[in-house]
Image (cartoon, rainbow, N blue to C red):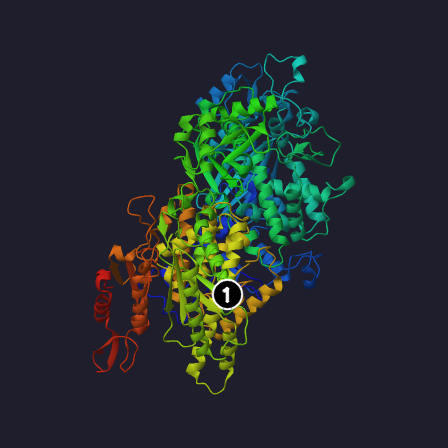
């Protein structure tokens, strides 16, 4: 992740970045050879056109439903790469400052988040402002030509519905874009439009770049004479409007010489408001000399503001009435707020254009605030279309305009016109995040209107124009918007890290990354009761029923339920409107509450509350049961079994309620995406519902060890600390290490013990190591005598490095748990530092001492502190453990894990939880894992440190981040070619940043491979969407490697948790093979190979039981001058012509030596020629 820096940082690399990078071996793909370059397929950034562009007029109220973000094609990357490179490589060049924005020093504090943030925003706005800002004669020419054609369309005399529709279809081959009733007593006709007006973003200059396309909205005012006083009732207005639009299409179609492409669409997905899209192409229309490749003119029929009474179209009025309705029943009819707002919408195009024009003149920052909002909305997948949440560019810009005009106390403006664009941007999100518009409608301007309360729909009512600006939003889309707004406010309030990318660059609308669980259901229209008087279609009713059932059934197990209905598409004017088929699907996004998602018992109402109890029983059916609890209460309850074969507790509940309320067919066709950890990770017990509970046996065994050790008597010194120092004890190992009666530990968990201080400790490094051995021998003797069922053994290590720790004690319990104890004596660091400063030691001794001091700090200081922090965070974030395990499994599956410290991989995963923006902390391992891949793919490790907050309270200080960043910059200055420190990862626990990555661990080629694989994985996630098979992400190809060493499977599995044996009888104590504990033959084999051939061959292996070791030849070792002590096995070759002898890697000899060293471990070796 990026930390605040004093200069503008780049997210893409120039060619000079790859200097001396021959370590990126030729056998890897070009992505790997880029050594961390962010290429165009970088899915998290996608493309600037998709992420920072693609926002145009069409998203306005007065723009088309398919224009802009809906009509903009994805995937065009050439233009976006240029913009991204320019945006991210310029070092802080400020945009031209508008008058009234003050000088440079004014942009800190509340005006902008920081000076750097202000420069980033200015540059972003420069890159996204429309290219056609000024008045363009060629566009005016195209619009004027179309206006002339429309004015020349002949009028049509009044005709019945049947005659009018038949005439269009027979004579003009145009289908009216709405199903018209046949038996009505009013007629349809066409007359020349009263006025024309270009509206939307284009005249206001608040659109954003759209690459080769431009969308322009043309308002066509229908003559008032075509309508009667009560045409607002019973769809009469919409029928006449649809016929009028079809007549426009027929008239334009008749002018064949213009070569227009014509299609219908729905305005923002509203089936009541079809629109006509007229397409022009630069090649087909050279006479206009268009400034863009494609121009789409969206024709929006409209009516005068005073055509229908405003009070008749208020949110509480009913305008859809059956024939049987009479005056006495009118008051009991439900309101038709959506229908009413749709009628009002057609009359307000000019009014809102004037409002925005006035506001932009009064507040100079308004335009830029609209642009920032458009970018933010695009990145999060919000749009004005109903299917996009019903909150897009129009709603954003109008909401800001209304709050600059009113909405505050006593009718005063809620926002000051002197606000900067950033202040307006942030204040708008504070407004959205802080108000509950579902329960408390907000009236802005105008007289006090009668507004529905607790209507279940968000209401921001523009009193002056009698419109609920949020009328297209649903309860679920509003809650998702509020969730995103709160996350944005939180990140903007965070002064520790720079969140510019999270706010404006990173896409967050990928469902599998945004939600914890994604479910796809078929649209079963037959399951819905048809209501001919309801203006909403069957899919909308289906979605409302889904939301109601899921919200009630899942209750506190979820925080958010989001329903994504099928998307509408434009259609040809000669065809009927496209309708949803039974094969269409509805996508459900669920955000879980990790504390409640997998609970076994749900408590319902009290048995004394007869009405609530009856409702509960009706909803849950036979699953509901009456239970008495320990506190004496008798409640309706639901009990779920973790042993059920249908999946997790959450999936059981979801399946049950869908089956009960929508039928078994729907459940059989359900696609459930999420909980990938259940299938990809080995669980400790099928009855466990908490990820951390799987590790409880090994944690409990460690606690027993601590009690046993502290309870020992006759020790020379009292024990001060017994500290966990292993990923197995922080819930972070890929496999569950120990389950009593089922598996035993093959790898002992590291533990650090520290005795109380004493002057009797020797003051010599060698003597200290001997004293440690004596202590461990005494400790082993006492444990054998005092604890039953334990085996101890003292071992030696690092015999060739006298300054390193020399001994350890293995403690193996008969139940299968095993621990490796090392003694920490703090005097060692003092002696090592003293020796390091001595002037009499040689440079080689100084290097050895410095290395020993770093290893001492890592083993005895950093590792225990890291494990303790991870234990705390795993309790704070219940799904952190499976997220880490998935990420480590991903690294192992791609043969990378041996190059990375386990603690470093922990830091990569924790980022998604402690600094999760633009999301919040995930509540499922699947979402956490996918977001970790996104962050990893975006990490420019050459220029940015990876900084993680491991504190329990999440209050890492900016000064600490600044210190870490300074240290990172110092390392890059010292080691610009990254020979020693390639990756820099720090936290508040370890501010050094090199504890886990020093000495080129990993080397550049491996770091580049990591980035390339992460980017490829994220690209696959984006490509497949909800059809992603998670298993695909864990499949790695071996075609790019030069050498493949295939191991015998029986040896490859040694070192993994193994099944406990008891001779087949449950009442017989399980046996433990003590010699096998800590014995990892393949790991030892790999260590030998790296020591012998590491200069010539880089090895890759899955340390979690992988049976293939892959290798890449180092190209730097080829064609060297012939000399002694080259450091690798070589063969001489004479160059042709000059007779000069060069040394080449003896590849065949090395392979033969590998086979000899491996012995029975090696099954076969494949050597590939390239």
Which residue is nearer to you in this view: 536 or 1018? 1018
Residue 894 sits above or below residue 579 on the image: below
**Residue occupying the point 70% across, 49% down:** 363
Residue 645 sits above or below residue 682 on the image: above
Question: How many numbered markers are drawn?
Answer: 1
Residue 647 in view (yes/no): yes
Q: Left of 306 or right of it: where is 977?
A: left
| Residue found at the far bottom of this picture | 840
Q: Quadrant of the C terminus?
A: bottom left
> What element does badge 1 sit on?
helix
Residue 1063 drawn at (x, y percent)? 28, 47
| Residue found at the far right of this picture | 410
Residue 124 drawn at (x, y percent)? 57, 56
Which residue is nearer to you in this view: 947 or 620? 620
The image quarter containing residue 95 is bottom right
* Residue at the disc numbered 1: 862
Which residue is nearer to you in this view: 969 or 614? 614
Residue 266 sits above or below residue 289 on the image: above
Q: Left of 454 or right of it: where is 88?
A: left
Residue 266 drawn at (x, y percent)? 52, 32
Residue 571 sits above or below residue 852 on the image: above
């Amino acid at each position: 992740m990026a930390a605040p820096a004093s200069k503008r940082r780049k997210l893409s690399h120039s060619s000079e970045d790859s200097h001396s990078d021959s370590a990126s071996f030729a056998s890897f793909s070009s992505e790997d050879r880029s050594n961390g370059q962010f290429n165009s397929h970088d899915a998290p950034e996608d493309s600037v056109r998709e992420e920072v562009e693609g926002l145009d007029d069409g998203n306005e109220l007065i723009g088309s439903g398919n224009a802009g973000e809906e009509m903009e094609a994805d995937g065009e990357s050439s233009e976006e790469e240029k913009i991204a490179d320019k945006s991210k490589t310029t070092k802080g060049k400020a945009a031209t400052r508008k008058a009234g924005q003050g000088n440079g020093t004014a942009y800190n504090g509340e005006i902008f988040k920081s000076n750097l943030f202000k420069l980033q925003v200015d540059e972003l706005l420069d890159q996204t402002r429309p290219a056609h800002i000024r008045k363009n004669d060629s566009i005016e020419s195209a619009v004027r030509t179309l206006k002339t054609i429309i004015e020349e369309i002949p009028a049509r005399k009044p005709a019945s519905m049947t005659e009018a529709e038949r005439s269009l279809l027979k004579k003009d081959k145009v289908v009216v874009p709405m199903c018209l009733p046949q038996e009505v007593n009013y007629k349809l006709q066409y007359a020349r439009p009263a006025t024309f007006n270009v509206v939307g973003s284009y005249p206001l200059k608040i659109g954003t770049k759209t690459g080769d396309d431009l969308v322009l909205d043309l308002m066509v005012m229908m003559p008032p004479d075509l309508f009667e006083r009560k045409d607002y009732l019973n769809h009469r207005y919409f029928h006449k409007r649809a016929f009028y639009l079809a007549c426009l299409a027929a008239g334009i179609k008749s002018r064949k010489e213009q070569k227009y492409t014509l299609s219908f669409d729905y305005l923002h997905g509203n089936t009541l408001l079809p629109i006509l899209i007229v397409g022009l192409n630069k090649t087909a229309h050279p006479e206009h000399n268009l400034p863009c490749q494609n121009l789409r003119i969206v024709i929006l029929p409209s009516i005068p503001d005073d055509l229908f009474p405003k009070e008749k179209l208020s949110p509480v009025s009913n305008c859809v009435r059956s024939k049987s309705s009479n005056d006495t029943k009118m008051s009991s009819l439900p309101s038709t707020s959506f229908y009413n707002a749709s009628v009002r919408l057609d009359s307000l195009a000019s009014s809102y254009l004037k409002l925005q024009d006035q506001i932009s003149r009064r507040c100079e920052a308004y335009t830029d605030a609209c642009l920032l909002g458009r970018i933010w909305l695009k990145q999060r997948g919000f749009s004005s279309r109903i299917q996009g949440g019903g909150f897009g560019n129009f709603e954003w810009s109008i909401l800001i305009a209304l709050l600059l005009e009113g909405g505050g106390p006593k009718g005063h403006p809620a926002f000051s016109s002197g606000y900067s664009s950033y202040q307006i941007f942030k204040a708008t999100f504070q407004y959205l995040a802080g108000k509950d518009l579902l329960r408390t409608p907000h009236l802005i301007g105008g007289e006090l209107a009668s507004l529905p309360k607790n209507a279940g729909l968000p209401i921001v009512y523009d009193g002056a124009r009698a419109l609920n600006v949020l009328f297209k939003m649903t309860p679920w889309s509003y809650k998702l918007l509020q969730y995103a707004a709160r996350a944005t406010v939180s990140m903007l309030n965070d002064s520790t890290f720079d969140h510019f990318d999270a706010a404006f660059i990173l896409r967050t609308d990928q469902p599998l990354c945004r939600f914890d669980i994604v479910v796809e259901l078929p649209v079963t229209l037959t399951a819905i009761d048809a209501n001919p008087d309801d203006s909403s279609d069957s899919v909308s009713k289906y979605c409302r029923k889904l939301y109601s059932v899921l919200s009630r059934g899942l209750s506190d197990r979820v925080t958010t339920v989001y329903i994504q209905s099928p998307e509408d598409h434009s259609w040809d004017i000669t065809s009927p409107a496209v309708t949803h088929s039974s094969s269409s699907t509805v996508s459900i996004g669920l955000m879980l509450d990790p504390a409640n998602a997998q609970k076994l018992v749900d408590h319902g109402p009290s048995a004394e509350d007869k009405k609530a109890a009856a409702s509960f029983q009706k909803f849950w059916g036979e699953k509901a049961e009456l239970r008495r609890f320990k506190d004496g209460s008798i409640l309706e309850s639901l009990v779920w079994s973790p042993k059920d074969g249908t999946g997790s507790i959450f999936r059981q509940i979801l399946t049950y309620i869908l089956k009960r309320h929508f039928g078994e067919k729907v459940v059989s066709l359900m696609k459930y995406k999420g909980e990938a950890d259940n299938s990809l990770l080995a669980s400790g017990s099928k009855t466990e519902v908490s990820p951390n509970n799987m590790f409880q046996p090994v944690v409990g065994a460690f606690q027993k060890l601590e009690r046993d050790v502290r309870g020992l008597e006759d020790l020379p010194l009292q024990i001060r600390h017994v500290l966990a120092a292993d990923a197995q004890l922080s819930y972070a190992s890929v496999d569950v290490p120990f389950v009593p009666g089922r598996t035993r530990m093959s790898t002992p968990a590291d533990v650090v013990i520290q005795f109380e201080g004493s002057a009797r400790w020797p003051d010599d490094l060698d003597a200290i190591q001997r004293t440690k051995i004596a202590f461990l021998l005494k400790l082993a003797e006492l444990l054998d005598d005092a604890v039953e069922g334990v085996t101890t053994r003292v071992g030696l290590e690092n015999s060739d490095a006298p300054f390193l720790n020399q001994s350890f004690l293995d403690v193996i319990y008969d139940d299968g748990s095993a621990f490796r104890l090392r003694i920490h004596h703090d005097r060692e660091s003092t002696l090592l530092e003293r020796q390091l400063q001595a002037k009499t030691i040689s440079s080689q001794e100084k290097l050895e001492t410095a290395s020993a001091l770093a290893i001492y700090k890592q083993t005895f200081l950093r590792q225990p502190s890291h494990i303790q922090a991870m234990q705390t965070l795993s309790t704070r974030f219940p799904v952190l453990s499976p997220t880490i395990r998935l990420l480590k499994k991903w690294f192992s599956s791609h043969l990378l894990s041996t190059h990375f410290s386990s603690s470093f991989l922990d830091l990569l995963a924790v980022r998604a939880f402690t600094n999760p923006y633009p999301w919040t902390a995930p509540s499922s391992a699947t979402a956490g894992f996918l977001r970790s891949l996104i962050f990893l793919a975006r990490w420019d490790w050459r220029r940015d440190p990876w900084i993680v907050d491991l504190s329990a309270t999440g209050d890492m200080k900016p000064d600490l981040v600044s210190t870490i960043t300074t240290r990172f910059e110092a390392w890059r200055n010292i080691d610009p070619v990254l020979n020693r420190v390639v990756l820099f990862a720090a936290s508040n626990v370890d501010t050094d940043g090199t504890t886990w990555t020093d000495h080129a661990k990993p080397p550049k080629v491996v770091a580049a491979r990591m980035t390339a694989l992460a980017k490829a994985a994220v690209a696959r996630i984006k490509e497949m969407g909800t059809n992603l098979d998670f298993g695909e992400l864990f499949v790695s190809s071996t075609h790019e490697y030069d050498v493949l060493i295939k191991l015998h499977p029986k040896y490859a599995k040694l070192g993994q948790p193994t099944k406990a044996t008891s001779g087949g009888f449950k009442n017989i104590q399980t046996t433990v093979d003590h010699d096998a504990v800590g014995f990892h033959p393949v790991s030892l084999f790999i260590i030998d190979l790296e020591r012998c051939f590491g200069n010539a061959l880089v090895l890759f292996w899955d340390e979690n039981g992988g049976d293939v070791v892959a290798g890449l030849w180092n190209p730097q070792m080829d064609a060297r001058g012939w000399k002694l002590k080259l450091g690798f096995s070589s063969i001489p070759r004479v160059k042709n012509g000059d007779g000069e002898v060069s040394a080449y890697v003896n590849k065949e000899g090395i392979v033969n030596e590998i086979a000899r060293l491996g012995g029975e471990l090696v099954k076969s070796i494949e050597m590939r020629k390239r």
